[in-house]
Amino acid sequence: MKIDWTKYILSFFITLAIFLGAILLSNYFSNKKLSQLQNIQDKIATDILSSEVENSLLEEESCTDVTNSVLSGELGSLADKITYSENNIGSSDELTSLKKNYSLLQIKDYLLTKKIAERCKLKFAFILYFYTTADDCTECVKQGYSLTELRNKYPALRVYSFDYDLDLSAIRALISVYKVPKELPALVINGKVYSGFKSVEDIEKIAPALKDTLPKEEKKAAAKITPTVSPSEQPVADTTEPKI
């Protein structure tokens, strides 16, 4: 039987063209994603430099000029960029670098806002939230939702979230200072560590001074509300010593 080599050769070249086209298309989109991350990185570098200048200026400001957390707007913007990158680009060295810069900016905001609050007698509340991105940490997802709800309820509350497994010396220092355990999620409230999921009601019981951060009208309204907590939502007893 005579073999039609023309047909086989044509099929080979068509298959090769499809294969090479797929590779080129994949490289194009990969390079585009990397370019997007590079643009974000450049913006963050500018934001961090700008924040350092702002920090120096605000240390010289009078308390009458201080109205809010200095870097909170930038933090929200960077958080959105990280979420977008995780959902659309996936894990990469560039995204890890992005998260490191975001974490450093959070620590800067935390230290600056604490200093301003002490100097100007402002009523801010602070929570450091340590989580993991591991797929099996469903409690971390729940904790994130409850902290968002709490932050919406108390505008003067500052919540700073840190990936426990992120290889960053500044985060390792925080973990060491507050002796944060590996059992996640974990919260640092008033210098004390609480492991495991905590509901909004749990945190309000742990930090009753949160209500003091509300305006007088809202504080009176909150005082009239007695939340009902089911037995399953009772705060988990913390057996660790206070960590400062």
Image (cartoon, rainbow, N blue to C red):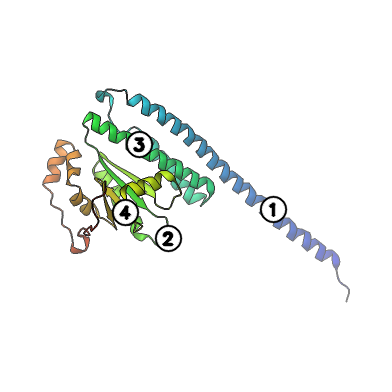
Mark 3 sits on what residue?
109
* Quadrant in the rendering for residue 133: bottom left
Residue type at mark 3?
Asp
Question: As rendered, which of 58 and 231 lies closer to the eye?
Answer: 58
Toward which corner of the image does residue 221 lie, by quadrant?
top left
Q: Amino acid at mark 4?
A: Ala
Give the SS element for disc 1. helix
Indicate which disc residue 186 carries: 4
Rounded to the nearest whole Å, what is the CA distance between mark 2 and mark 3? 29 Å
For badge 2, the amino acid type reads Asp
Q: Nearer the viewer, residue 142 or 129?
A: 129
Q: Is residue 11 left or right of residue 32?
A: right
3D distance between C-alphas at marks 1 and 2: 34 Å
- Residue at the disc numbered 1: 21
Up-down: is 200 above or below 12?
above
In front: 135, or 163? Answer: 163
Comes first in the chain, label 4 or label 3 = 3
Image quarter hosting the N terminus: bottom right
Q: Label 3's element?
A: helix
Horizontal and vertical percent position of residue 229: 17, 58
The answer to which of marks 4 and 1 sits earlier in the sequence is: 1
Whole-angstrom CA distance, mark 1 to mark 3, is: 47 Å
Comes first in the chain, label 2 or label 3: 3
Q: Secondary structure beneath disc 4?
A: strand
Which residue does the image show at 69% across and 53% down from the upper left?
Answer: 21
Q: CA distance from mark 4 to mark 2?
A: 17 Å
On the image, the x and y values in percent for residue 131 come to 37, 53
Work out whether mark 4 precedes mark 2 in sequence or the reverse, and give the earlier one. Answer: 2
